Image: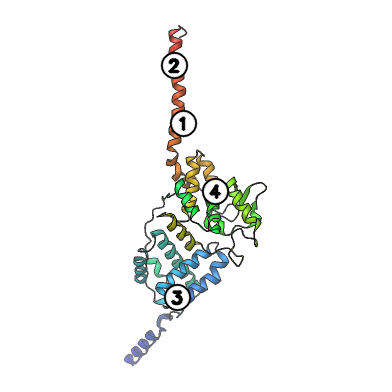
Amino acid sequence: MAEKVLAKKKTEVAEGKFLDVKKAPKIKFDEMTTMYIEKYAKANKKSWTRDATCAKNLHRHFSSIILSKITAVDIEDYKSERIKQVSPRTVNIEIKFLKAMFNKAIVWGKAHGNPTDKVALFKEDNKRTRYLEENEIRELLDNCSDKLRAIIITALNTGMRKGEILKLRWEKVDLSNKILYIIETKAGEDREIPINDMLYESLRNLEEGKNGPYVFPNKEGKPYVDIRKGFKTALRRAGIKNFRFHDLRHTFASHLVMAGVDLKTVQELMGHKSFEMTLRYAHLSSSHKKAAIGKLGVKMQSLVTNWLQGCEDGKY
């Protein structure tokens, strides 16, 4: 009798019934990522397009694998292959997306565990401040299509993030008062950016042929999802290496500081939540600090000269 009970329990274990063990849902990875993007990311995240890009890159590796079959080792394999192609930051973004998707799968009853919990992220160098020199700016603008050139001019003269630029609507562009109104920013705070002469001419030309509510629409009148291909082509033609679109934002801040603009103003224009984020550009103002000390030296020399002259004249 005991042997029969044991045999029955073994059968239940094999069928996933013993001790309330449930069978893992057999949803495929690409089905889950599509569900996550459509049902959650689009409705709840401003940066859902980045999630869509992550999903696309992950599909190439995991494709139609059953979600519950993916292990921490599989993810480590993905990391080791992916790091050969992109930066540690990009890999980390994709792993964070994977982690969020698995967590949502657990909530939705599509998975019983999250293999990313046992996967460490790469260390990142968050102090990167790559920016374009003046000659590089000219080369980049000379090698762009007209549409891309207008986008880059906006980035160089406002410090706006790529997503903010691509989603910019005409209703937020006040050419009469030369102000851009940026809402729903990454930092969660609205900000205003003055429009300088170069940007004004670019936007005025775009306004004359505008088609729809967006400043930079695609052929369907909707915002571009990404401009990576055109941007990479322009960089290659200009001979510019080791540069990302986000570095145009660094270029904006760097040239402000080198032009003598104080860091507090740079913080406000960049929309940085903390002053520490702006301090990465402080070293670029060294020449201006030297110029200030030089002016002080001239003044002090004048004071010393006048004092010595006074001593000779018996005034002191």
> What is the C-alpha distance between the residues marked 2 and 3?
80 Å
Q: In what element is the residue under mark 1?
A: helix
Left or right of 121, for residue 144: right
Q: Is residue 252 left or right of residue 190?
A: left
Q: At label 1, which amino acid type do we have?
A: Ala
- Between the C-alphas of marks 1 and 4, the distance is 26 Å
Which three-letter amino acid code belongs to the residue tagged 3? Phe
- At label 4, the amino acid type is Asn
- Give the label, 3 or 4, closer to the camera: 4
Residue identified by numbered label 1: 292
Q: Secondary structure at mark 2?
A: helix
Q: CA distance from mark 3 to mark 1?
A: 60 Å
Q: Which mark is residue 157?
A: 4
- Residue 173: x and y in percent read 64, 53
Q: Residue at x 46, y 35 (%)?
A: 288
Q: Report which residue position mark 2 lands on.
A: 305
In primary-sequence order, the first of circles 1 and 4 is 4
